[in-house]
């Protein structure tokens, strides 16, 4: 496999170019990508916007590798920072993606109320590709109540809005307020779901101590901004 230049790095993986159509996502913790591939394949079959799955041309990746479609276009976070997408427009995109995801029946769970949850759906994990918004990074996907997914997205935004080192924090706060208004139409963010989301974030080894220190205040901000 010829691996091209590094395109970007996240908390757990690095993304390399393969060619104009495909990228290689390589995990640094030797995680097996089988579960992520299964979720993405299932969602794709149901019409949900995820990257197309490789490998192209018979390339056989390692178990820690994921070959996926190379998506042209900015992330939603980049578009928000550039001002090409407003906070209200960004909220509409996030709310729609969560709503469409939660309309798909669970893949494994026998509980009909459960749905597939992304559990990390925020502007950096949405690419505004020519064909529309595409959701990336399904490493944290699970199945459970949709309210937990709504809570996770809201809590992540609240943490960013409270980060003193983030210059656009006020814009993220506006995005969160707009998103919570839209999510109220789907059941909102119940206190129990918010508490569970905070517990999951607290236990996440990928989060820094500074991020975890903001969790209580972030949960309070979600509650304060949620429509009555």
Image (cartoon, rainbow, N blue to C red):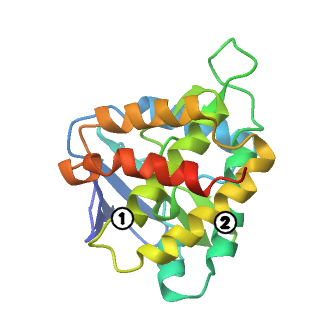
Q: Residues within 10 Å of mark 1 (few under 14, many from 20)?
A: many
Q: In the figure, is residue 148 to the left or right of 49?
A: left
Q: Position of residue 92 (x, y in %)?
A: 72, 65
Q: Residues within 10 Å of mark 2 (few under 14, many from 20)?
A: many
Q: CA separation, marks 2 and 1?
A: 38 Å
Q: Nearer the viewer, residue 32 or 178?
A: 178
Q: Position of residue 9 (x, y in %)?
A: 27, 62
* Residues marked 2 and 1 touching at CB (< 8 Å): no
Q: Residue furthest top?
A: 110
Q: Is residue 221 above or below residue 128?
A: above
Secondary structure of the residue carrying tag 2 is: helix
Q: Position of residue 41 (x, y in %)?
A: 60, 38
Q: Residue furthest bottom?
A: 83
Q: Is residue 141 above or below residue 51?
A: above
Q: Position of residue 50 (x, y in %)?
A: 60, 52
Q: Residue furthest right?
A: 185
Q: Quarter of the image containing the N terminus? A: bottom left
Mark 1 highlights which residue?
18
Residue at left offset 56%, top offset 28%: 192
Mark 2 highlights which residue?
178
Q: Is residue 46 above or below residue 109?
A: below
Look at discs 2 and 1 and give the one toward the viewer.
Answer: 2
Q: Nearer the viewer, residue 189 or 68?
A: 189
Q: Is residue 195 visible?
A: yes
Q: In the figure, is residue 54 to the left or right of 164?
A: right
Q: In the figure, is residue 127 to the left or right of 227?
A: left
Q: Is residue 225 above or below residue 89?
A: above
Residue at left offset 55%, top offset 67%: 127
User: Mark on residue 105?
Assistant: none
Label located before the other in sequence (2 or 1):
1
């Amino acid at each position: 496999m010829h691996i091209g230049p590094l395109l970007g790095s996240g908390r757990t993986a690095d993304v390399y170019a393969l060619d104009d159509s495909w990228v290689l996502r390589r995990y640094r913790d030797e995680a097996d990508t089988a579960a992520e591939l299964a979720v993405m394949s299932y969602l794709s079959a149901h019409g949900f916007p995820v990257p197309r799955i490789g490998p192209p041309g018979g390339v056989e990746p390692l178990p820690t590798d994921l070959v996926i479609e190379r998506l042209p276009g900015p992330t939603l976070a980049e578009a928000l920072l550039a001002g090409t997408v407003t906070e209200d427009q960004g909220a509409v995109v996030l709310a729609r993606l969560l709503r469409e995801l939660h309309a798909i029946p669970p893949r494994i769970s026998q509980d009909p109320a459960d749905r597939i949850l992304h559990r990390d759906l925020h502007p950096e994990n949405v690419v505004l590709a020519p064909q529309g918004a595409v959701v990336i990074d399904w490493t944290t996907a699970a199945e459970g109540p949709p309210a937990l997914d709504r809570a996770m997205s809201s809590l992540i935004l609240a943490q960013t809005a409270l980060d003193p080192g983030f210059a656009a924090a006020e814009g993220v706060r506006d995005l969160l307020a707009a998103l919570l208004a839209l999510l109220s139409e789907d059941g909102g963010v119940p206190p129990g779901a918010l508490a569970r989301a905070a517990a999951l974030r607290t236990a996440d080894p990928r989060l820094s101590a500074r991020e975890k220190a903001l969790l209580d205040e972030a949960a309070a901000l979600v509650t304060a901004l949620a429509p009555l």
